[in-house]
Amino acid sequence: MSASVSPSAPGPDPQADSGALVRDPAAAEPYPAIGDYALIGDCRSVALVSRTGSIDWLCLPHFSAPSVFAALVDKARGGRYLLRPADILSCRRRYDGDSAVLVTTYHCRDGILKVTEAMSLLPEDSGGEELQPQHELLRLAECVEGEVRLQAEFEPRPGYGARGVRLRRRGRLGWYCEVDPGGRYRNKGTGALYLYGDMDLQAEAGGARLRGQMLLREGDCCRLAMVWSGNGICVLPPASEVGGRIAGTRRWWMQWAGKSAYRGPYREAVLRSCITLKLLTYRLSGAVVAAATTSLPVHQGGERNWDYRYCWLRDTSMLLQCLLDLGFRSESAAFIDWLLHATRLTRPRVDVMYDVHGNPVPREDIARLEGYRGLGPVRIGNAASEQLQLDIYGEVLLTARRYVEQGGELDGHERRLLLDLGEAVRRHWREPDNGIWEIRLPRRHNTHSKVMCWVALDALLAVHGQLGLELDEEAWRAERAAIRDDIETHGYNADLGSYVGYYGGTAPDASLLLLPRYGYLPADHPRMRGTWTLIQRQLASGELLYRYPPGSEYDGVGGADETFLLCSYWQVDYLVRLGEYPRARDIFERLAARANDLGLLAEGIAPDSGEPAGNFPQAFSHVGLVVAALALATAPEGDGRDSGAGGRRRAYHGGLAGFPEDGLSGGDTQAEREEP
Amino acid sequence: MSETERLSMQAAMEVDMALAVLGILVWAVIATLAMSSLMFVSQFRGWSRLDLPLLLGSLFTGDRESASLLGFLLNFAGGCLIAFLYYFAFAFGGSGAGWSAGLVAGLVHGLVSLTVFLPVLSHIHPRLASEHDGAGVRRRLEPPGFLALNYGYRTPLVALAAHAVYGTVLGAGFRLLM
């Protein structure tokens, strides 16, 4: 056992930590709360690190590959990688600046330990001339006061816990094992893992697990590197570089975050959301996964366990619209490239979701894992990939519109793709679909989907106005008007004074809050006000919002639903458009308080316990936060009641197709003519 | 024999020689492509992590893309050059060319590569780490180990199979030339 002294570790003094103090995390229940996890990653995969230093979730070589560590959904079988002091009294944690480098400070009985961890991402100017590993997870433990006994446990369980490994010693190179997920996952996550560093580890259980301990005194440190290679020769940077490589990773993130043009309120929360969204972006293709995990339950005893580790075109489009507003343009260009690639076999039809490489999502399967807190099933793959969700076309075309409006250029193939998507909308908008919430009932005419078809054609016409596409403008305008007529006739219930979730229904749907955002009609339109009132009456629970009436037969899935953070944030966007800034700010701040101590958001909040629920962290929720903050950035200081002459409000033009100050809807004059 | 006849015969011999070299080169390219393809497929399928182009290219550069490209060219050129050794071995070895002779030669070639070439490479390669000394700032590439088993337990089989294919193609091809 050796201990190195005074490494070049990044980050300020641990005394300056600002994260929440939590007492006695070691005494926590066997499964940590979902909000107890932190996220680190390298924009190809992510690891979830518990407050007590256990990496309980990591899939390699990418987000939707089979897991290597999955204790998150099965503590006994999943496998984990633990590094923590033996006697924790309390801990604080934070991200190091605007980065995804995690710093956890443990207060122990006899000392204080700081653990800095990251998956490496190095700036181009720091890679030097040397080979870099495919994936690298770095952990640096430093004793900053007294003495601390550090313990480690390393137990990879490939293939969602289905397979063991045989760890072998390779001299001074460290410990090594082949990773073979086996079965149907054999070709998706085969590779090799190395673990090496300062701690002397011993194999247990026939090489299935490593354990080690070492005593660190003030100034000592322990460096550990885990390196993965999928199908090539492993590259093993020396352990002495761990501190420097973490510092390089921090610099990479700071450089990336520095591109943000956002200077509005709640900057810290917005930037943390952007970093989280970037962590969920597969940088080799531009695809963005909906969440880092699979099957974290929405509700105890329900069936709502889904695999979100795929790229939903809707989610990605919404995300990129945000990133465009924040000045991150290269991500949008990458997404459009990826979209061209992904849809090459299905155009003009687009699938609901793809894997990070643009391939179809695998059929749904149940892994032999007990599930988070025993609340299985653990699903791999997603059956919703076979659904028809017409709103996707609108989101994708909106992204293209925003991209073009911000000076992005489209080549001939990309223009053709947009026209194909528009053509698909013209052909299919009259059909029923499964809608934004992926309803697993017979298809129906979802109002939001119809609106998004309108949005698709509206966006295409806007792009045509900018770039001059080869389309019959009058015919497309007529089609757009026909969609609006259809919505106003069937999607609005005059008795309720509100739009409804689907034609012929009486229940509201939170997605209808987006109508003003999409430029379909102004927020203060009587029909929209009526919709807002009905949504508040039937879907609100404090500052939180359900997607649709809970406990109803709305979605055909058993078990109760949770409040949905994305929808909750949509309230803020709507209220800003309405000019009700104080209320918007109040809701935003109460929602922001629902994030964990690191600013990470799950899919929703369990109404009974108030705990984060569902997959974590969820891109959609962070998109909601950014959308809401961008809306609030346009609000005047103070309560805003006296802003503007004659009581006129300052209109919010941010985000998508803003509406003009006279309150009429639409991104162009035709939309005004169509206004109901 | 007149001077004219002698010159004519010499010219004919030179043409024959050129055609023979061309024939050898054609079969060398085919055999090298077959071997490289098999190695690539086995790597892609996860049967072995042996990446010969990277291993060769990283002799000269630490940039992964440059190393892979350079290594591919070196590997290809090496495959073509070694084909000439096969040709001379078949021509002067007594047994003549044929797929079975090629198969045996390929297996021997593979075995030599695994037991001699890779171990020697480990010692002279500036970027290969060693189990004895550990990884270094520059020496950070996983070493092949005995029979290249560090790159997966199927690696010796894959390497032997790839060389066997190489030898078989050359043996069968050269039989047509001889």
Image (tube, rainbow, N blue to C red):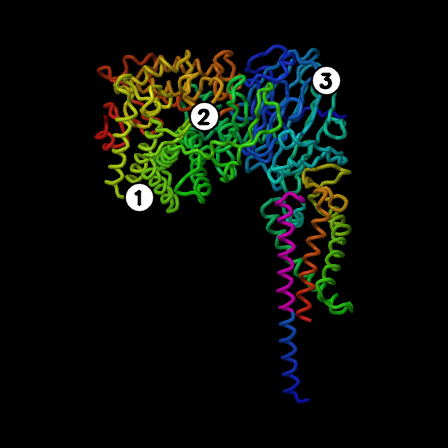
Marks 2/1: CA–CA distance:
31 Å
Above or below, A354 relative to A115: below
Tell me which residue sits at (76%, 56%) in the image: B108
Query: B112 left or right of A653?
Result: right
**What is the three-letter code of the residue carrying label 3?**
Arg
Query: Chain ID for label 2?
Result: A
User: Which of disc 3 and disc 2 is earlier in sequence?
Assistant: 3
Q: Which residue is tagged 2?
A: A620
Element under label 3?
strand
Residue A649 place in picture, x, y as percent: 27, 18
Residue A294 place in picture, x, y as percent: 55, 27
User: Which of disc 3 and disc 1 is earlier in sequence?
Assistant: 3
The answer to which quarter of the image holds residue A44 is top right
Q: Which residue is tagged 1?
A: A469
Residue A7 in view, yes or no: yes
- Mark 1 neighbour density, 10 Å: few (under 14) some (14–19) many (20 or more): some
Q: Is residue A341 magenta?
A: no
Element under label 1?
loop
Query: A13 left or right of A407?
Result: right
Q: Which mark is residue A149?
A: 3
Between circles 2 and 3, the one closer to the viewer is 2
What is the span of residues highlighted in magenta in the rendered image? B21-48
- Mark 2 neighbour density, 10 Å: few (under 14) some (14–19) many (20 or more): many
- Mark 3 neighbour density, 10 Å: few (under 14) some (14–19) many (20 or more): some
Query: Chain ID for label 3?
Result: A
Query: Chain ID for label 1?
Result: A
Query: A141 left or right of A364?
Result: right
Marks 2/3: CA–CA distance:
40 Å
**What is the three-letter code of the residue carrying label 1?**
Leu
Residue A207 place in picture, x, y as percent: 75, 30
